[in-house]
């Protein structure tokens, strides 16, 4: 499909390229690629307000993007720019969500997609997405960091566009989430909590908040609280981790590509990057699902685990907090089944048996 065909498609409206055109490195010749990404819900989380003492805690539900993660904002822009520059194929390394998103946008725009994923270490739903969208899946006998190194080298030698977050258009697309938050709340929050893996997203949010502040769309910057898993916390340790390990496979990364961006976000915002244990991540994962009705994937719950580990003592009185919920829980049903005790009763087909169970449940 040519870029003019993309431009004239009736679906080519809405999405971040339309809504935030003035803030993106695009012009009239950039195809308005969209699956309707962005404009995600921002919802209050009362249980977290009680736990932290904050006046307001908001969850930015990036899991509600078309492929179920925040990656779609950046992917729309990266794919649009790749088409504008004449690419016919995209390539990425991924812990799962980037590959799902790249595969979907490539399918929509008639591009080939090649995705490198750490074999056996990505959630099944994400693999299913890449497969369903027709991507060529390279299952790497190594971790994400190995896969990203190969991906970067491959794009130096082959006519494929790299759509990892080392691609600056990804960061530009993802910064629109911070802009949306300010647009909706009327100002920047006091604190923003976000999971950190390859560190593209914290870099992107900080850019979005900074640009809006400079343009006087907000009166302040939030402090950025980046959250890593304890077994994959290079930014907390100050050095790469050779063998990262965590149940939050999306952020199982030992050598983040946007290291400098994350450090700048932390230091310029007078924030912090902290580590939380897998047990804390799972606790937040269950709390979000059980008390807020938000079923996210474990990596996403890290932002809330970080908030609770820092401010579970009620120290945030008078503050407004936003946590990014990066990916959908349905991507990793195996983790849910393993770590959440399902309340199941086996019954026969008779009405009476069902009635008895429900009467007992209501009692
Ligand atoms: N949350 C989820 C659900 C993710 O998939 C990722 C990253 C992150 C948080 C961390 O974001 O890398 O910008 O710091 N997933 C990438 C991927 C690495 O390949 O899907 P980050």
Image (cartoon, rainbow, N blue to C red):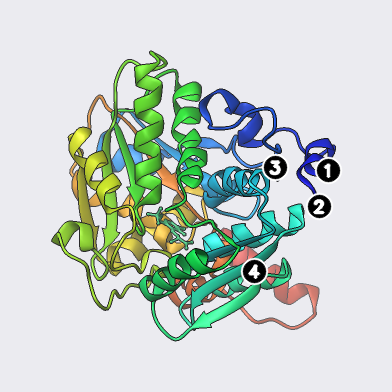
Q: Residue at x 70, y 37 (%)?
A: 32
In-image side of 328 versus 186 (left or right): right
Return the residue found at the far bottom: 141
Between the C-alphas of marks 3 and 4, the distance is: 19 Å
Quadrant hosting ligand 1: bottom left
Mark number displayed over residue 5 = 1
- Between 117 and 228, which is closer to the camera in this rendering? 117
Task: Give the image location of residue 62, x and y in percent.
Answer: 52, 46
The residue at label 4 has a CB less than 8 Å from ligand 1: no
Q: Which residue is mark 3?
A: 33
Between the C-alphas of marks 3 and 1, the distance is: 11 Å
Q: Which residue is mark 2?
A: 1
Do the numbered discs 3 and 1 sit on residues whose CB atoms are within 8 Å? no
Task: Give the image location of residue 354, x and y in percent.
Answer: 71, 72
Sooner in the amino-acid sequence: mark 2 or mark 4: 2
The local crowd at label 1, few if under 14, some if 14 to 19, many if 20 or more residues have their Cα within 10 Å, is few
Between the C-alphas of marks 4 and 1, the distance is: 24 Å
Do the numbered discs 3 and 4 sit on residues whose CB atoms are within 8 Å? no
The local crowd at label 3, few if under 14, some if 14 to 19, many if 20 or more residues have their Cα within 10 Å, is many
Sooner in the amino-acid sequence: mark 4 or mark 1: 1
Is 336 located above or below residue 346 in the figure? above
* Mark whose residue sits in front, 3 or 4: 3
Between the C-alphas of marks 2 and 3, the distance is: 12 Å
């Amino acid at each position: 499909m040519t870029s003019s065909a993309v431009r004239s498609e009736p679906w080519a409206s809405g999405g971040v390229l339309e809504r935030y055109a003035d803030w993106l490195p695009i012009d009239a010749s950039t195809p308005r690629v969209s699956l309707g990404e962005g404009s995600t819900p921002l919802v209050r989380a009362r249980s977290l307000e009680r736990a932290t003492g904050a006046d307001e805690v908001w969850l930015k539900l990036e899991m509600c993007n078309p492929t179920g993660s925040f990656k779609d904002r950046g992917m729309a822009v990266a794919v649009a720019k790749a088409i504008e520059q004449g690419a016919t194929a995209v390539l990425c390394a991924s812990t799962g969500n980037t590959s799902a998103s790249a595969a979907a946008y490539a399918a929509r725009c008639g591009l080939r997609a090649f995705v490198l994923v750490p074999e056996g270490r990505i959630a099944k739903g994400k693999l299913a997405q890449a497969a369903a969208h027709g991507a060529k899946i390279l299952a790497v006998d190594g971790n994400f960091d190995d896969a990203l190194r190969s991906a970067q080298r491959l794009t130096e030698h082959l006519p494929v566009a790299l759509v990892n977050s080392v691609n600056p258009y990804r960061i530009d697309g993802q910064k629109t989430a911070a802009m949306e938050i300010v647009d909706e709340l009327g100002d920047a929050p006091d604190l923003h909590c976000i999971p950190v893996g390859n560190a593209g997203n914290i870099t992107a949010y900080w850019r979005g908040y900074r640009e809006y502040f400079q343009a006087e769309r907000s009166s302040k910057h939030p402090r950025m609280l980046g959250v890593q898993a304890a077994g994959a916390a290079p930014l907390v340790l100050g050095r790469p981790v050779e063998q990262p390990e965590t149940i939050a496979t999306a952020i199982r990364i030992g050598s983040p590509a946007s290291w400098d961006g994350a450090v700048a976000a932390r230091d310029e915002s007078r924030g912090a990057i902290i580590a939380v244990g897998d047990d804390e991540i799972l606790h937040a994962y269950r709390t979000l699902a059980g008390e807020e009705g938000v079923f996210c994937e474990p990596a996403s719950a890290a932002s809330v685990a970080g908030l609770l580990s820092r401010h579970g003592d009620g120290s945030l009185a008078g503050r407004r907090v936003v946590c990014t919920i990066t990916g959908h829980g349905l991507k990793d049903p195996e983790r849910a089944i393993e770590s959440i005790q399902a309340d199941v009763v086996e019954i026969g087909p008779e009405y009476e048996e069902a009635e008895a169970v429900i009467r007992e449940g209501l009692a």
